[in-house]
Image (cartoon, rainbow, N blue to C red):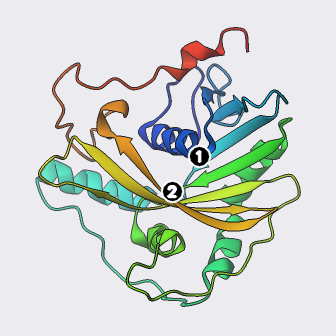
Amino acid sequence: MSNVAGAKASREEKIAFLALEQVLGVDIKLADAGAGDKKPDGSWVYADGQERRGIVEVTSPPATRLMGEWARAKKAGQPQTEAGSIPLRWNELAQVCAEMLAEDWARENLNKLLAQSADERHLFLFARGHGEGAHYFYRLSDSYDDGISEQVDDLILPHGISDVWFRGRARWNHDQPLGAKEIWLARFQAESGWRRYVVSIEERHLPPPNPSIADDRAPAGWRIPKDRAMELVGD
């Protein structure tokens, strides 16, 4: 994501970092602290004695119009909704992904990863709304508990990109909005294809939501997000 020099990780980046740490068993540092938008968002070294280094860039399809609508709705005390429809494109999810990764915003983030030395380069995608890609990401990460599945072909990633992640739906207890939430993920690995995961993330470990979009229900001092920027000492 585009970060000014010295910025802390955003809520969306924190979600991505926590999810990747659970799946990969790593400890992610804030790679772009003090570097503006020149470096990927996070980096890590696998604890396997081989000093293998991974990097990740967290980004999303543009959603300026939708975010503006949600901000105006919050200010007016109205529900935040989405209008319109999107093509179903059943059994075409791989083509949808390929088209998305070919767009300018995605290519810029892929190029940022490719400009850095690393053994693994991961692109982590989330979507603000269904029309911006969330509908397709939900289907990519679906565990098909209802027994209805669709074909998802392999992707052809740019040489040097090892993994692309798609953040799908989230589920939490509405009676405990500040508790843990489950998040579905789809991951495509250049070497081994598609995998799917469900991770659990504690709301307390996340920064508050964007105040222009949603109010923070947590009391002051309740949140304890990991200060990853401090880990850059000696990096």
Q: Residue at x 70, y 65 (%)?
A: 101
| Nearest to the observer: residue 59 or residue 47 | 47
In the rendered image, residue 124, in percent from the top left (x then y), is placed at: 60, 52
Q: Residue at x 65, y 69 (%)?
A: 100
In the rendered image, residue 28, in percent from the top left (x then y), is placed at: 61, 30
Other-residue count near label 1 (Cα within 10 Å), few / some / many at <14 / 14–19 / ≥20: many
Residue tagged by mark 1? 58
| Nearest to the observer: residue 122 or residue 132 | 122
Question: Does residue 77 lie above or below 10 as drawn?
Answer: below
Q: Compute the Cα span from label 2 to label 1.
A: 8 Å
| Nearest to the observer: residue 45 or residue 158 | 45
Mark seen at residue 196: none
Is residue 118 among the parts visible in the rendering? Answer: yes
Q: Is residue 235 left or right of residue 159?
A: left
In the rendered image, residue 179, in percent from the top left (x then y), is placed at: 24, 42
Is residue 103 among the parts visible in the rendering? Answer: no
Question: Does residue 122 lie above or below 26 as drawn?
Answer: below
Mark with earlier residue (2, 1): 1
In terms of secondary structure, where does tag 2 sit?
A: loop
Q: Residue at x 69, y 37 (%)?
A: 40
Q: Is residue 155 left or right of residue 225?
A: right
State which quadrant residue 214 falls in.
top left
In the rendered image, residue 227, in percent from the top left (x then y), is placed at: 48, 19
- Marks 2 & 1, CB-CB < 8 Å contact: yes
Residue tagged by mark 2? 126
Quarter of the image with the N terminus in it = top right
Q: Is residue 25 left or right of residue 208?
A: right
| Nearest to the observer: residue 146 or residue 36 | 146
Q: Residue at x 57, y 33 (%)?
A: 3
Type of amino acid under label 1: Val
In terms of secondary structure, where does tag 1 sit?
A: strand
